Amino acid sequence: MLTVYNPKEKGYKGYVFYIINKQDYHIIRVRNEEQEKMLYYCWHGPLLEQEEIDWLIKQSGFKYFDNVNEFVAWQEKELDKF
């Protein structure tokens, strides 16, 4: 998990959370308020600047999903190919 503190964002207490899957090169932004709250209190990950997240998405080949539902829909579509 990656965390960005940005009080201008609508994240939980100013934090924005991303799930990172290094094996498949996926970055998934968590937007659900209950999920954000759980991550805030239960998980700890590196605190990054937004520019570092943007670099991971644009320069390192990670596929970005704007929310968990978007990722699940994409994953289901990919699995249906088999």
Image: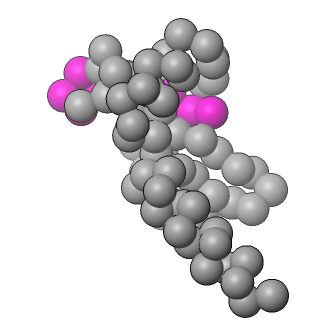
Which residue does the image show at 38% across and 40% down from the upper left? Answer: 31
Figure quadrant of residue 33: top left
- For this orientation, the residue located farthest to the left is 8
Q: Is residue 3 visible?
A: yes
1 to the left or right of 68 = right
Report the number of discs. 0
| Residue 8 lies in the magenta-colored region | yes
Which residue does the image show at 59% across and 41% down from the upper left? Answer: 19
Q: Quadrant of the C terminus?
A: bottom right
> Is residue 47 shown above or below 73?
above
- For this orientation, the residue located farthest to the bottom is 81
Which residue does the image show at 60% across and 24% down from the upper left? Answer: 46
> Is residue 36 shown above or below 44?
below
Q: Is residue 65 visible?
A: no
Find residue 18 and report its horizontal and vertical position in percent.
Answer: 52, 39
| Residue 20 lies in the magenta-colored region | no
Figure quadrant of residue 51: top left
4 to the left or right of 14 = right
> Is residue 47 shown above or below 59?
above
Find residue 21 and report its horizontal and vertical position in percent.
Answer: 70, 50
What range is drawn magenta here?
1-9
Q: Quadrant of the N terminus?
A: top right
Which residue does the image show at 63% across and 58% down from the upper left? Answer: 26
> Is residue 22 shown above or below 79?
above
Find residue 10 and report its horizontal and vertical position in percent.
Answer: 24, 31
